[in-house]
């Protein structure tokens, strides 16, 4: 199996796992962790693409909210404490990617002369 086939197989497994998580979470789990979602069925299909991609985060967050079914602010305090660290990491990653992009130079192939396709007036 070459690398491309392996990558496609892994992506397919990821999406099928995400589909299973989306099915269980949107039919049973979302009602348990979010009281405002009870009876609201129209928005759930809109969440399917995000859950397909981010299913590990959905499972982790679902487990955390099931364990701490306290007040609203107590449930979301850990996420808010992580915002400054995430902002610093994002800025550092952007600076690193920008410097890597600017440092990668492409040289013009030696011995190749530019060719004029047409005259300036045509």
Image (tube, rainbow, N blue to C red):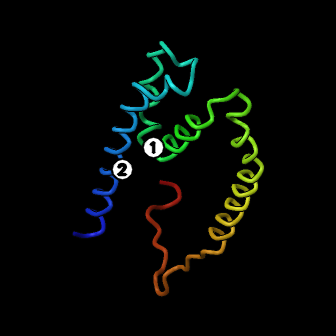
Q: Relative to the observer, which residue lies in front, 54 or 97?
A: 54
Q: Residues within 10 Å of mark 2 (few under 14, many from 20)?
A: some
Residue in view at x 21 percent, y 69 percent:
1
Task: Left or right? Give the position of 42 relative to 107.
Answer: left
Residue 14 is marked as 2
Q: Relative to the observer, which residue lies in front, 118 or 8?
A: 8
In the figure, residue 73 lies in which quadrant?
A: top right
Relative vertical location of residue 91 with respect to residue 18 in this rendering, above or below: below
Relative vertical location of residue 110 with respect to residue 118 in this rendering, above or below: below
Q: Relative to the observer, which residue lies in front, 66 or 115?
A: 66
Compare marks 1 and 2 and give the one earlier in the sequence: 2
Residue 118 is marked as none
Q: Residues within 10 Å of mark 1 (few under 14, many from 20)?
A: many
Report which residue position mark 1 lands on: 55
Task: Left or right? Give the position of 103 relative to 63.
Answer: right
In the figure, residue 61 lies in which quadrant?
A: top right
Residue in view at x 48 percent, y 42 percent:
59
Residue 77 x, y percent position in the rendering: 73, 38
- Distance from disc 1 to disc 2, alpha carbons, whole Å, reads 9 Å
Residue in view at x 69 percent, y 42 percent:
79
Secondary structure state at the residue bearing disc 2: helix
């Amino acid at each position: 199996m070459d690398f491309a086939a392996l990558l496609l197989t892994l992506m397919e497994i990821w999406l099928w796992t995400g589909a299973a998580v989306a099915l269980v979470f949107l039919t049973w789990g979302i009602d348990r962790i979010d009281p405002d979602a009870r009876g609201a069925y129209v928005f759930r299909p809109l969440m399917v693409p995000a859950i397909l991609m981010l299913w590990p985060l959905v499972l982790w967050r679902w487990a955390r909210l099931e364990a701490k079914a306290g007040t609203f602010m107590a449930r979301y305090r850990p996420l808010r404490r992580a915002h400054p660290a995430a902002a610093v990491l994002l800025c550092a990653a952007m600076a690193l990617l920008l410097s890597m992009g600017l440092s990668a130079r492409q040289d013009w192939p030696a011995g190749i002369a530019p060719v004029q396709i047409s005259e300036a007036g045509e």
